[in-house]
Amino acid sequence: MGDNMTSITEFTLLGFPLEPKIQMTLFGLFSLFYIFTLLGNGVILGLISLDSRLHTPMYFFLSHLALVDIAYACNTVPQMLVNLLDPAETISFAGCLTQTFLFLTFAVAECLLLLVMSYDRYVAICRPLHYSVIMSWRVCITLVVTSWACGVFLSTIHLVLLLPLPFCRSQKINHFFCEIMAVLKLACADTHINEIMVIAGATSVLVGPFSFIVISYMCILCAILRIQSGEGRRKAFSTCSSHLCVVGLFYGTAIIMYVGPRYGRPKEQKKYLLLFHSLFNPMLNPLIYSLRNSEVKNSLKRLLGVERVL
């Protein structure tokens, strides 16, 4: 069998096998979403860097979340748009593995950043008197660096396990980008260890942090209900609700894709879930934080020179 194996140097991403007119419509729609994603997250990054009032731990973490969202979109969307225009367009083997590595890195980093942001909210609301000591800049930088480092480390493990595999089957990947499980299906060797590592890694960075976030917000809710001031209670709910919306969108789709049951017709359904995960989530995050956060809206008004008229 080894003599008959041919070395694959490129892959074809099947993407969304639809009629040409529909593909062109999707190209236009997804291009707009991509632009909105870059603009929205770019505005968040710009506001946080330019406005000294936003130089706090919460917005420091939010800036890195915006950076991850931009990287997410830039890693998967351009290739998807190219394939919508030309379904026969290929991606090189090295390019495919790079895309897989970067996607996993950004996914793990975002998981841990959302966990860090929930911890920040927990300390701010449940232990406000000790906030400046617990969430010092040294601690904040350490948490962010650790989030990125864990993403790179776990992705490197998957890449090391993926590289030795021989690919001698069809060159067609049934996805719009080089998603790791879709790539593994093309290997002509036993991928059991790889699949176990993917599921174990997904479980460790999804279920564990999500459980901690749920516990944190249970404590936060109890603390908010004890606040006597209606204005203070409203402000606390406002800042936490934005983060909860983002957590729900991100963890909900990710857990269904990688930890949920694998029966029925999961392939097409999970492909569209990943589309939501990698395109719509990054686009919605800055909208959620800007629309539900008065500090971000006020910062934008100050930057544009718009004074609030009462």
Image (cartoon, rainbow, N blue to C red):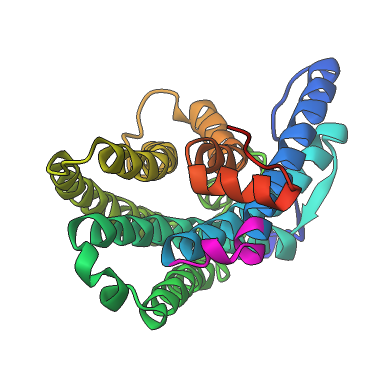
- Residue 129 occupies which quadrant of the picture? bottom left
Viewed as shown, does residue 14 lie left or right of 153? right
The majority secondary structure of the magenta stretch comes to helix
**Nearer to us in this view, 296 or 232:** 232
Q: Quadrant of the N terminus?
A: bottom right
Residue at x 60%, y 60% (from the top left corner): 48
Residue at x 81%, y 33% (from the top left corner): 84
Does the rendering let one see residue 218? yes
Q: Which residues are magenta?
A: 47-56
**Nearer to us in this view, 99 or 245:** 245
**Nearer to us in this view, 258 or 205:** 205
Viewed as shown, does residue 115 lie left or right of 185? left
Q: Is residue 229 above or below residue 67?
A: above
Residue 141 locus on image (x, y percent): 45, 78
- Residue 173 occupies which quadrant of the picture? top right
Residue 191 locus on image (x, y percent): 44, 57
Does the rendering let one see residue 1? no
Q: Quadrant of the C terminus?
A: top right
Residue 297 locus on image (x, y percent): 58, 43
Residue at x 69%, y 28% (from the top left corner): 16
Magenta-colored stretch includes residue 274: no
Magenta-colored stretch includes residue 53: yes
Residue 237 locus on image (x, y percent): 31, 39
